[in-house]
Every structure is written in C-alpha cells, then in structure tokens.
Amino acid sequence: MTTVFGPKRSAGRCSYALWLGRGMLVASLWMAMRPAPGAEVTTNATPAKSGQATTNATPPKAGEAATNAAPAKAEESASKEAAKPDEAPAAPTPEQIYEGGANSYKNWIEIGAGGFMVKGDAGQAEQQQQMKRGAYGGIEDLHFEGNIDKKTTLTLDGHGIFDDHDYDLRLNVKREDLGYVRLNFDNFRTWTDSSGSFFPPDNLHFSTSGEGLPLDRGNILFEAGLTPKAGPKVTFKYTHQYRQGNESSTIWGPANTSLGTRNIYPGSYTIDEKSDAFGVDVAHRIASIDFGGGVRYETGTLGNGLLTTSQPGGLDKQDITDRQGTDYDMFSVHAFGETWLKKDLFLSSGFVFDNLDSKYSGSQVYGDDFSVAFSPNNALGGLGYYDLNGRSHLHDYVFNLTLLAMPAKALTIIPSVRVDKEDWSADSGGTGTLGAFPTEQFSSRSDLDEVDVTERVDIRYTGITNWVFYAGPQWTEGSGNLKENGGLSQVFGIGFPPIQYATDNSRLFQKYMAGARWYPTRRLTLDAGGYYKYNRYDYDATLDSTPNGPASPNRYPGFLVMQGFETYDANLRLTLRPVQNVTLVGRYEYQVSTVNTGPDPVSGLGETESARMNSHIVALNAGWVPWSRLSLQLGFNYVLSDVRTPASDYTAAVLRANNDYWTLNFNTGFVLDNKTDLNLGYFYYQPDNLQNNSAAGLPLGAAAQEHGVTATLTRRLTDHLRLNLRYAFTHFEDFTSGGFNNYQAQLLYSSLQYRF
C-alpha cells in the first residue's frame, strides 16, 4: 500500500525541500546557459520582474566612446567600467530562486488547514494514508534562528496540528567554543484498521470499529554538552519515550461459518509503554589518541494487552484478555579508543557491558467482557492463567576491534572482530485455569549461556581506471547451552505438560559478497554485485523429557537437531545519461532462499528442504528536464516472489505463498511563472495473489487496485508570503476483503507561509 496524502506532519518541510531542490536544479541550468564572460549583455528599459537580474546600462564595447555628458567622477567611473571586460550577472542562489527575488529569508511560520474526506471503509483509509478523517489545522511549520550575542545562536523549529495529536518542538542554544543545550518534544499518532478476515462462502466480514485504531508515540529529549576547543567534551542526555493507545492484531479469534470454525474475528492490542533513560558521555584527545566512555541507566514499564473474541454472536461467546506487563532496569557502560598507528594504519576498539533486570506479570482471562476478573464458575472459559509473576536477569558483554589498512594507494583493507557473550536466567510461576475445573499451579525456570565471535574483512580496490571493486567475507561462530524446566499452565491433564530439556547448541554463519562499479563514460555507470549467505544451527539435546519417536504425541522441544538457511543474491544496476538533462536508471535483483531442516533420527525422518523462496525485482526510473521550468519523473517497479513448503504438496490447508505486485508512479514539476509552481503526481499499485482456500482454511494473499493523484500549487504572493494549495485523491479496491475494505478519499489542504 502507499501513502498518497501524508503524513501531514512533514508536509511543510517536504514542500520546502521540494521547492529548494527545484531551485538548485534551475540554478544549475541557468549557470549552464548564461552568457560567457566577455559576451554582450542586453537589458530592457522596463523594470525587471521579481527574480530577474537588472543592469543600469549596457557596458560599451571595446573601442567605443562613452556617450552622455556626466560629472567628472561619473565620467571616471564610466571609463573604468569601459575598461573592464563584459561580465554576466552572478547566478541566483537556490534560496533566491525559491524566494522569487534577491532577498532570501531564513525564518518562517506556516499556518495551514484542510480536511480528509472518506467514502467507504474509513479504518482502511486511515491506516493506508496515516491520517484521521475530518478537518485539521494549525501551525504546519515554524522555523526561527538568530543570534543572542556574537557567539551564541538560538534555533527553534516545530509544528502543531490541532486535534490530531501531532506536535513537534525543537529548541537549540549553542555557544561557540563552550557548548549547547537542546530540548526536543515530539508526539504523533498512527492508525491501524480494526478489520478481520473475509470468508467468501458466507460473505462474512467482521470489523470492531468503523474508524482506525489510534496509537500515540512520543519522545521528550533534554541534552546538554560542553564542547570547548581544548579539553574533554562532556554530554548529558535525558530521554523519555512512550507509546499509548490501540493497535490492530493479526491474531484473530474463532468464529462459526458454514464450513466450520475459522479464525476471522479481529483482535487488537492495548498498549501502554514508557521509559526514562539518563546518560553521560565523555570524549577526549591526548596526543594522537581519541578515547572516551559513558554510562547509561534506563528504566521502563510495558503494560500491553491482547484482546480477542471467540465465537462472536453465539451463546458460547467469550472475550479473552491476555495481559502482559514488564518492569525493567538497565545499567550500561561503554568505552572506546581510536588512533592512527601510522599514516596508512588506523586502529579503533570499543567495549559495552549491559546489566538488565526485569519483572514481569500476566494473565489470560475468559469472560463476558474484556478486562474482567477470573471467574471460577465460567464453564465456557478455555485454558488460561492468572497471577503470573517472574523475574529475569541478563548480562551482556560486547567487544569489537577494527583495523583500517592502506597497503597500497588504491587498496583499502578493513578487518574487524566482534565478541559477544550473554548470560541469561529467568523463572516464573502462576495459576492455571480451565473453565470450572479447579485451578492448578505451574512454574518454570530457564538458563542460557552463549558466546558469538564475528570476523569480517572489507576490501576496496580502485587501481584500475574507471573501476571500483569491493568484496567482503564475514563469519560468525557461536556456541552455548540452554536449560528449561517446567512450562505453562496445565489443568485436569489438558494443556502443556511440564518439560525437562537441556541442549548444547552451535552456530556457523557465513556471508560472502563482491561487486564492481564501472564508469566507461561520463554518462554511463554500471554496478553489479551479489552475495551468498548460509546460517546453520545445530542442537544436541542432552536432556529431553518428550520422546521424539513416531508414536509420540508431543515432540517439543527437542525434535529438531539442525536448521540451515541459505541465500543467493545477485543484482545489477545501470545508470545512463544519454543527454545532459535525461537520467535513466534500471535495476534488477534476483534472490533465492532455502530452509533445510533435520529432525531427530529417532523419528525415522531425514533432512528435508522445508521451504524455498524465489524473488525477482525489476525497477526502472527515468528523469527528464526538457526545459528549465519543467521536470518529469517516471518510476516502475515489478516484484515476483513466492514461498513454497513441502506441506503445500500434501494438504490444501497450507498454500504456496505469493507476493507479486507492481507499481507505477509519475511526477512533474512546472514553473508557471516567476511566482507560481505546479506539481502533479500519479501512483498505481496492484497485487494479484488471492488464493480462495475457504474449504480447507483461510483465504490468504493480497489482491487489490489503487490509484492516487496529487496536485500542489505554490504562489509567492509577495517577498514574504507564500500560498500553498493541495488536492489529493485515491481510489482503493480490495478484493481480498470482498470489497468491505474499499474506499475513496479526498484531501483538500491550504497553507499560508510568512517568511521573515
């Protein structure tokens, strides 16, 4: 899917960047077409328009006498001017082109208002466009910078959109050769659709709300730093982050259909997360060595819940609330050092230690509503739990060492090594429930100890004219052990039985990449490259309470003894500039990945290819500037991707997954006159992967069509005022949902910017 309209929070800044970029392009073309020094320059007697260079008189040609009598000083000045060679006026800067005149203004405030109108599924429209339907408005963009004194500058940026929970404020005060203070506040809202799946035989579709589910995300930052010319540099940083609201889930509840029970009823998350982090960093240089370090403390609370419904609309309807809570404290220290050992040899190293302590809680309760207490008389309740409490403790040590060597002028070699050691332990306990059966206690304990060593070498060679070669192998060797004892809830012999399990595991990751870039001419660039990657995991179960033989009903967790993930990737990119104002870019990438799985030999099964994925990606882009006032861009992307597993050969319940789609986009910018710009855009998206598997399972795969158009008109009313008018339209048809997620949306938006 695409976002045709927004998000609104960046509309002002994006528009300014677009205008500024166009100004730079026009300035470059103006420079290319301007008269050469010494060429004759003509002028008009009429006043120049805004943005045009003016001269008072045409300089006389060599050998010609100046006309018109004048005072002595003026005559002397004219004589000197006549002696100079003819010069063209200086090219305007991008800022001047944007302003439409010689004056450029570094401060501005932009106030805007608009409306997002939806016909059809508002929740789907809000999710794809990341906008709330209805009216909105406020300060779209604000920028101010100035000097407090000769050495102190102040910068203020921000915006605030009324009733849309979209706010941003950035204040920065910097004192030359002393330090800075920075304050940031950022809050924005995202939307997700509350729809479930669609069941074609019954034309059945569920949605818990006609609107998108809102989720607020925010960040508050205070940072202060001492940056003297000489001496240590010290930085203090405090950060508060949060997420609050609701978000849709792809974990759906079961519902009755004409072909049995299908998990198609929508679920959602309630999210309440917040964290506070404090950090101090120090950096210093002594002789030729740069070194530093820092400490960081973070504490946070995560309180989330998954809300699902079983058998909606029936007498056996149950609302299921799955609460997950975590409180954590993390302390971290880090240090680094780097220096040039010789003029062609650079060494850097770093170390990090993390200590993480967590407490967690949870419950899964069935009832006639969400967030109710457990009732022992609820005979319809499924397998659940309450009073889950536990603790975990993590120690993580990371060390890295990097060497940059230039043994020859055109050769760079960068070897590096990284060591990561992790110790982790956790325990938990709670009360298991199942309908009206008596509750039962459960508990668990796990311990993990792992070490990974990663080596990498990056090589770059430029010794052949118009060629750049690069290559880089990477290896990771790891080993560890895992112990598990206990499990989740089990009531009346139903549920997950306790297990005893221990395994020694090893890992070997390999990746080899290589490529080249060729510049046969100034107008042609060819890039070719690829990589090979293979990750292998081996497990040796030293203790496993679940037998893995053919007659065992439960083979978790020691059934697998090996898994391997292999990927081949090749890509080609061509950049062609047949003429100065035309750029063509083509890209092709092919990737094939396989997953091989080896079960315990006791099972009587052998190693098999459990999955294979093939992907073809084709991208074509063209840019043309036929005129200094006109630019055209065209883009096309085509993706073919499918995933196949052996299960799809034996059962219709598991299908071969496809992800094929193509997109087309077109954009043009036209300078109507010295004060007016027009931008037009078009976008098209189509996947066609729907597999109606209703008889055996859920119909999966995306099938849709989407068209979108945008138009933006910018008018510079005066040197200080800019008017923005924007219209956008999108039409979306979703065949996967049987048309229930279809919508048409329109955006009308206007803003007025004052620059000073």
Image (spheres, rainbow, N blue to C red):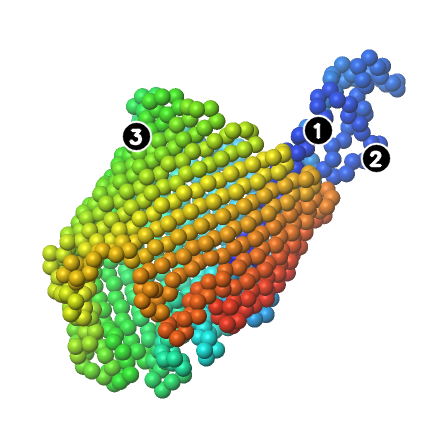
Residue at 27% from the left image edge and 68% from the top image edge: 362
Q: Which of marks 2 and 1 is nearer the N terminus?
A: 1
Identify the residue at the far front of this view: 649
Q: What element carries label 1?
A: loop
Circle 1 sits on which residue? 34
Task: Kindly identify the amino acid type of the residue bearing the numbered disc 3.
Answer: Leu
How crowded pointer 1 is (Cα within 10 Å; few <14, some 14-19, many 20+) is rated as few
| Labelled disc at residue 336 | none
Kindly report the distance in space between the C-alpha atoms of the residues bearing marks 2 and 1.
21 Å
Please provide percent x and percent y for residue 195. 45, 71
Q: Which of marks 3 and 1 is nearer the N terminus?
A: 1
Q: Mark 3 points at which residue?
A: 403
Q: Residues within 10 Å of mark 3 (few under 14, many from 20)?
A: some
Image quadrant assignment for residue 64: top right
Tell me the distance, in whole angstroms, between the alpha carbons under discs 3 and 1: 49 Å
The answer to whether the residues at label 2 and label 1 have Cβ atoms under 8 Å apart is no
Left-right relation of 643 to 663: left
Residue, disc 2: 46
Where, by quadrant of the figure, is residue 626 drawn? top right
Q: Which residue is drawn at 68% across and 33% down?
A: 30
